[in-house]
Image (spheres, rainbow, N blue to C red):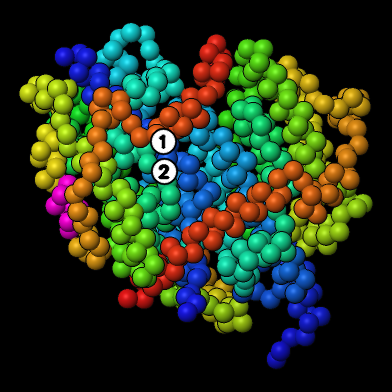
């Protein structure tokens, strides 16, 4: 019987450089199970002190926006300029608002 | 309404011209995808096969410090291989397929790794010249148009900055050491100089993929431009430590740039075609490790399913 | 006591160096690339530990030798690493079983040594313990993963256990060096270590569905500098440059 041989599923790795900072995507790895995934992530992405926190998630569990949906997802935010502080006029002399 | 190919191609080229990165799910011409798959996987294989010539000296590194540095550096090469395989996989080809292409001889890797490492100074020459040449190329590739490739390059450049320095440090120690050490250093330079120049590929006029790659900004600068940059940086470094670049035709031009003799292109194409000193050995080493690892990978898959 | 402390520290360094060297041999030969890098990380940790122990040994000896002299200029008979560490890599099962035995040993050893009355040893042990905790986690998982993986992997793991078991006995054989330093509160108590090691090994073997081998022939002698034939070749390769060019600086 021929058994399966492959590199295992793909996982996405997120590292937190310092405590308090957001987790950022570092890259991806192959791993066969959860333990191997978090360890491979540690051994590959934190060799130079790049981490105080680490997440891995199977790539297939990531939901992303399809390119054809990008316009309807992101462009409606373009004209909501009133969401930004610079939209508002404040009298001169007011500091730190 | 569905856009036609012509329209998509125009929009694609506009993005490229405006330095907007292409991401995995974006539309891209088939030829762009193929070109990237070829280039990135070739780059990944080079990193991984490149572990071997230096690996040849791990057990003989002459001090604890040298042993740690060499091992960490080789590990970095493997890590860079991983970053690049991941970038290439975003184009829809699995790592298993890349490995299969490598083993079948369908995928190439940089010919420099088909040269043997014969003395300890070769560890210096590889870091200084081979990584030095690679860095010139990779710095330029940080601005490549494909997002995942560009991000991998940024990370790799950051990590590789120590590689060239450690190589030059070894070379300096050897060149300033005993008579035998100096001989080893010069011998290493003699053997690695020309193959390092060949790493940049054929002249622009003879390069099959160059012009389209430049238009799509997969490559940002031409082979000859990058090669010249490397030459001009490296020759003064050789002189500084008293080593002689093995090129009788070398000439410093009034503009401060060096004119070199002609590269032996017969040798270049021969090694590319598989007839270099170590081509068979390198591939056999990789295949053997892969074959011997099969039962481990199978066990991992079986364990994960339980 | 200076002599005993020197020898004790050398042993710690030798274990780390020879095992680290064996793992380094595996670089570019892993079953897949991620694992290749992980094994190299363990090797780098061990080489760092060796360097720290040798530096201290050189200081204790106070005879003008450096850590590199200790690694590169001593003959086989003056190396005191456990014979287990010098056993060849063989297949991945042998690498992981050897690693698991040594990780469990080092873990419980450093756990004791970090309380040593010798402050330098205590400090190196405390730092190394963090590294070894991770090593032990990984090798324990590999024991279970491969023990429970396929028929083939289970059989290979059992074979590796049988092959390497004879080298575990000498881990716990105390000599005059151990005894003297134990009384001083410097060395680890090997009887306590043995108990912990056995509990850990039994626990992991059980989880891995693997059999604890029967006790049979016991290899021993490393504390006197007696080794298997493998060490000579390791040193011949490792020490070749410094010995061939004694005046060179690297």
Q: Where does the image place residue B166, in percent across and percent down from the top left?
A: 58, 30
**Extreme top residue here?**
C63
Query: Taking the image as drawn, is residue B20 in sight?
Result: no
Viewer-nearest residue: B157 or B298: B298
Please tell me which residue is depicted at 14% across the width and 52% down the height of the picture.
C199
Residue C16 lies left or right of residue B240; in this view the side is left
Residue that sits furthest to the left in the current view: C183
Q: Are marks 1 and 2 in contact (CB under 8 Å)?
A: yes
Looking at the rendered structure, whether the residues under marks 1 and 2 are on a common chain is answered as yes
Q: Is residue A21 left or right of residue B81?
A: left
SS at badge 1: helix
Q: Where does label 2 land, which residue? A: C88
Residue highlighted by disc 1: C230
- Category of crowding for the residue at label 2, using alpha-carbon neighbours closer than 10 angstroms: few (below 14), some (14–19), many (at least 20): some
Is residue C199 found inside the magenta-colored segment of the image?
yes
* Residue B23 in picture, x, y percent from top left: 62, 68
The residue drawn where x is 69% and y is 38% is B116
* Image: B108 above or below B125: below
> How would you rate the neighbour count of disc 1 (Cα within 10 Å): few for under 14, some for 14-19, many for 20 or more?
few
Q: Pointer 1 indicates a residue of which chain?
A: C
Q: Residue furthest front?
A: C217
The quarter in which the N terminus of chain B is drawn is bottom right
Residue in the foreground of this view, choosing between B255 and A77 = B255
Q: CA distance from mark 1 to mark 2?
A: 7 Å
Identify the residue at image location x=62%, y=69%: B97
Q: Is residue C103 within the magenta segment?
A: no
**In this picture, residue C199 sits left or right of residue C121:** left
**Circle number at residue B178:** none
Element carrying mark 2: loop
Give the residues drawn in magenta, as a range.
Answer: C197-203
């Amino acid at each position: 019987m021929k058994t399966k041989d492959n590199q295992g599923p793909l996982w996405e790795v997120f590292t937190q450089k310092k405590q308090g900072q957001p987790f950022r995507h570092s890259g991806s790895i192959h791993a066969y199970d959860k333990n191997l995934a978090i360890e491979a992530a540690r051994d590959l992405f934190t060799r130079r002190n790049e981490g105080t926190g680490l997440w891995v998630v199977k790539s297939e569990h990531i939901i992303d926006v399809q390119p054809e949906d990008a316009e309807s997802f992101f462009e409606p935010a373009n004209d909501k300029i009133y969401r930004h502080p610079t939209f508002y006029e404040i009298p001169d002399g007011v500091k730190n608002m | 309404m569905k856009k036609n190919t012509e329209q998509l191609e125009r929009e694609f080229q506009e993005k490229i011209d405006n330095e907007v990165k292409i991401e995995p799910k974006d539309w891209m011409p088939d030829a762009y995808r193929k070109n990237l798959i070829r280039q990135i996987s070739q780059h990944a294989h080079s990193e991984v096969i490149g572990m071997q010539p230096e690996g040849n000296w791990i057990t003989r590194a002459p001090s604890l410090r040298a042993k740690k540095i060499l091992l960490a550096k080789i590990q970095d090469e493997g890590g860079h291989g991983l970053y690049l395989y991941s970038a290439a996989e975003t184009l829809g080809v699995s790592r298993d397929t890349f490995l299969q292409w490598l083993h079948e001889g369908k995928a190439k890797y940089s010919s420099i790794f088909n040269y043997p490492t014969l003395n300890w100074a070769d560890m210096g020459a590889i870091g200084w010249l081979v990584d030095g040449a690679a860095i010139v190329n990779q710095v330029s590739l940080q601005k490549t148009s494909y997002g995942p490739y560009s991000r991998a390059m940024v990370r790799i450049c950051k990590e590789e900055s120590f590689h060239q320095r450690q190589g030059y440090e070894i070379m300096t120690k050897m060149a300033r050491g005993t008579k035998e050490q100096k001989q080893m250093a010069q011998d290493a330079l003699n053997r690695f100089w020309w193959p390092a120049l060949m790493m940049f590929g054929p002249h622009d006029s003879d390069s099959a993929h160059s012009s389209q790659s430049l238009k799509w900004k997969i490559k940002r600068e031409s082979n000859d431009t990058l090669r010249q940059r490397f030459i001009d940086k490296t020759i003064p470094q050789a002189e500084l430590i008293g080593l002689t670049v093995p090129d009788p035709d070398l000439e410093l031009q009034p503009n401060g740039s060096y004119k070199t003799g002609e590269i032996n292109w017969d040798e270049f194409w021969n090694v590319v075609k598989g007839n270099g000193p170590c081509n068979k050995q390198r591939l056999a080493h990789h295949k053997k490790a892969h074959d011997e690892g099969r039962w481990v990978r199978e066990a991992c898959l079986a364990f994960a399913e339980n | 006591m200076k002599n005993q402390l020197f020898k004790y520290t050398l042993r710690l360094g030798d274990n780390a160096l020879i095992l680290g060297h064996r793992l380094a041999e595996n670089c570019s030969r892993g079953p897949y690339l991620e694992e290749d890098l992980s094994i190299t990380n363990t090797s780098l940790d061990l080489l760092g530990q060796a360097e720290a122990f040798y530096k201290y040994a050189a200081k204790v000896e106070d005879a003008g030798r450096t850590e590199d002299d200790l690694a590169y200029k001593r003959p086989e008979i003056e190396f005191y690493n456990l014979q287990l560490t010098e056993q060849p890599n063989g297949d991945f099962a042998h690498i992981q079983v050897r690693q698991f035995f040594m990780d469990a040993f080092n873990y419980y050893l450093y756990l004791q040594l970090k309380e040593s009355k010798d402050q330098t040893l205590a400090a190196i042990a405390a730092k190394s313990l963090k590294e070894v905790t991770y090593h032990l986690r990984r090798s324990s998982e590999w024991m279970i993963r491969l023990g429970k993986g396929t028929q083939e992997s289970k059989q290979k793991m059992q074979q590796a256990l049988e092959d390497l078991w004879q080298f575990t006995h000498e881990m716990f054989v105390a000599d005059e060096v151990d005894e003297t330093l134990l009384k001083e509160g410097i060395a680890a108590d090997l009887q306590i270590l043995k108990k912990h090691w056995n509990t850990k090994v039994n626990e992991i073997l059980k989880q891995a569905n693997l059999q604890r081998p029967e006790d049979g022939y016991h290899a021993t002698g490393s504390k006197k500098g007696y080794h298997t034939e493998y060490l000579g070749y390791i040193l011949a390769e490792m020490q070749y440059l410094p010995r061939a060019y004694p005046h060179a600086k690297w």
